[in-house]
């Protein structure tokens, strides 16, 4: 998830030569870029979802890393090193401007469902600090989502500086320390002679096949790996992008897989799959393992760390995608003047408030959907599907730009670009379609209701709304922002 991503340097030559610019370039090492990428992608939040699969979670993390994470990273690096302006510029140049608007809209629109799912995790985690029984309460979850989101809007609308610094601290406080502690205690838990809650034999390396619905949870991993187009803009800051960027991405992929896989395995050792909450699974595991070591007093402390990191991440991203949409809309007149207005701090407050009203309605759904885990999963799927629309457009644009502008200066050229785009496009399309199938873990609910909610959210927000904005636009919308 990123805003309009603008590289720090001008596009450089195909062989990595220095750009013809008067600006001084602050080069970074490929290791530093790998760590930056890891901090923006890795998180403990999806761990409970994959812990349901036990040892098979390794397979379910590696497959989307190969067919989605790697193509996305390499393809977006070529685009970012040749065209400034982020995904709108790439898609509008490669396809057309309406497609470019759709791409940047999807970058923004996915956050409408992303924040309720993120804050649903915060609510369940915070419940373990106050009262663990609240973790399964839809009313509690709805209240926390609304309070946290509107507090974030208030902070962001005041133009507070330095909020982005919370991201790096969040990686350490809310991901690395809790993740490492969870794995260490999980190993100690097994070392004491406790039996793993999930079987750890070679027969369990591949997920059991129970029809198409058994693969649906893998869709969540596409959202876990999304956002690589943000990191691609730093390709111009490498001295030898052609050699160093692939190394950075492979190192980042390895680190991300470790951060995703090991905590998921630790949770599967401690908490039986049938008892796992998709929102509170991390805290369930901590609570159980701390109980085994008579240290449950640590559970609230870990809960506060996870909550602080998640809220910091929310603040870091809250104004970004909407800012990108605003800049393009001012340039092209895609949004009505009301949504283009800035407050006295220069922040797009009207967009944030409008987004907040929709987020509030989504939050209330938690209060009416009996199972909090089901609500969390539905919103995660909608988020992923809306975002995947943008990636489909990006892969198509990359192939067309390589063919229509073969000599355009690029700091980095992705190897076998057409093949990478083909794999990435096919994987993204498959994940989007599979998301419409109810997962086997939620087979007790109504298939029709599930399909209606997911299709209405993903297609309505991802396609219908931007189509209406584009069709109903007026010349005065562009003039108002001139």
Image (cartoon, helix red, strand yellow):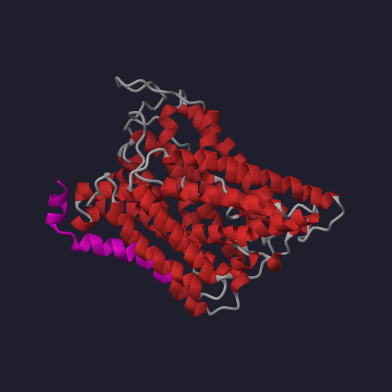
**Is residue 299 visible from the viewing direction of this image?**
yes
Q: Main secondary structure of the magenta part?
A: helix
- Name the spot of residue 137 as percent of width and height, x first: 57, 70
The residue lying at 78 percent from left, 48 percent from top is 187
Q: Which residue lies furthest to the right in this view?
A: 193
Which residues fall within the magenta stretch?
A: 454-482
Q: Does the magenta segment cover residue 403?
A: no
Residue 172, quarter of picture: top right
Q: Nearer the viewer, residue 456 or 167?
A: 167
In the image, residue 43 sits, relative to residue 283, either above or below, namely above
At a point 26% along the width and 44% down the height, the residue shown is: 346
Q: Which residue is drawn at 41% across and 38% down?
A: 162
In the displayed structure image, the side of residue 155 where residue 101 appears, left or right: left
What x and y, as percent, mark residue 400? 34, 45
Q: In this view, does 137 lie above or below 263?
A: below
Measured along the vertical axis of the image, is residue 244 above or below residue 93? above
């Amino acid at each position: 998830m990123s805003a309009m991503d603008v590289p720090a340097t001008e596009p450089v030559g195909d062989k990595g030569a220095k750009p013809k610019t008067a600006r001084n370039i602050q080069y970074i090492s490929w290791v530093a870029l790998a760590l930056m990428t890891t901090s923006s992608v890795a998180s403990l939040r999806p761990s409970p979802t994959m812990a349901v699969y036990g040892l098979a979670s390794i397979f379910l993390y590696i497959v989307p890393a190969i067919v989605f994470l790697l193509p996305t990273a390499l393809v977006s690096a070529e685009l970012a090193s040749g065209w400034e302006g982020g995904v709108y510029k790439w898609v509008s140049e490669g396809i057309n401007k309406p497609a470019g608007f759709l791409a940047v809209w999807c970058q923004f629109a996915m956050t409408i469902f992303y924040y309720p799912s993120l804050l649903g995790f915060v609510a369940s985690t915070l419940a373990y600090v106050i009262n663990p029984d609240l973790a399964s309460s839809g009313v509690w979850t709805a209240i926390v989502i609304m309070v946290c989101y509107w507090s974030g809007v208030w902070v962001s609308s005041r133009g507070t500086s330095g909020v982005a610094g919370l991201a790096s601290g969040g990686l350490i406080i809310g991901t690395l320390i809790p993740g490492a502690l969870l794995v260490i205690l999980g190993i100690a838990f097994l070392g004491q002679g406790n039996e793993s809650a999930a079987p750890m034999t070679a027969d369990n390396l591949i997920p059991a096949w129970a029809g198409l619905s058994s693969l649906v949870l893998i869709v969540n991993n596409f959202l876990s790996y999304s956002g690589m187009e943000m990191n691609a803009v730093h390709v111009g800051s490498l001295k030898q992008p052609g050699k160093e960027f692939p190394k950075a991405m492979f190192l980042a992929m390895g680190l991300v897989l470790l951060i995703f896989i090991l905590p998921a395995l630790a949770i599967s050792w401690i908490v039986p799959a049938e008892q796992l909450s998709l929102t509170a699974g991390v805290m369930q595991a901590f609570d159980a393992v701390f109980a085994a070591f008579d240290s449950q007093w640590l559970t609230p402390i870990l809960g506060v760390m996870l909550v602080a990191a998640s809220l910091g991440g929310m603040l870091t991203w809250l104004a970004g995608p909407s800012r990108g949409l605003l800049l393009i809309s001012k340039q092209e007149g895609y949004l009505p003047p009301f949504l283009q207005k800035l407050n006295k701090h220069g922040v797009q407050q009207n967009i944030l408030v409008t987004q907040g009203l929709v987020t509030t309605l989504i939050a209330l759904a938690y209060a009416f959907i009996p199972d909090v885990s089901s609500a969390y999963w539905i919103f995660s799927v909608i988020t992923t599907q809306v975002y995947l629309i943008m990636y489909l457009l990006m892969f198509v644009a990359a192939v067309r730009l390589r063919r229509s502008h073969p000599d355009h200066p690029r700091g980095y050229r992705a190897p076998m670009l057409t093949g990478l785009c083909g794999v990435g496009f096919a994987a993204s399309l498959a994940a989007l379609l599979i998301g419409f199938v109810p997962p086997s873990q939620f087979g007790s609910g109504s298939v029709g209701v599930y399909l209606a909610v997911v299709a209405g959210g993903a297609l309505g927000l991802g396609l219908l709304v931007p189509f209406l904005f584009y069709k109903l636009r007026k010349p005065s919308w562009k003039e108002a922002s001139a």
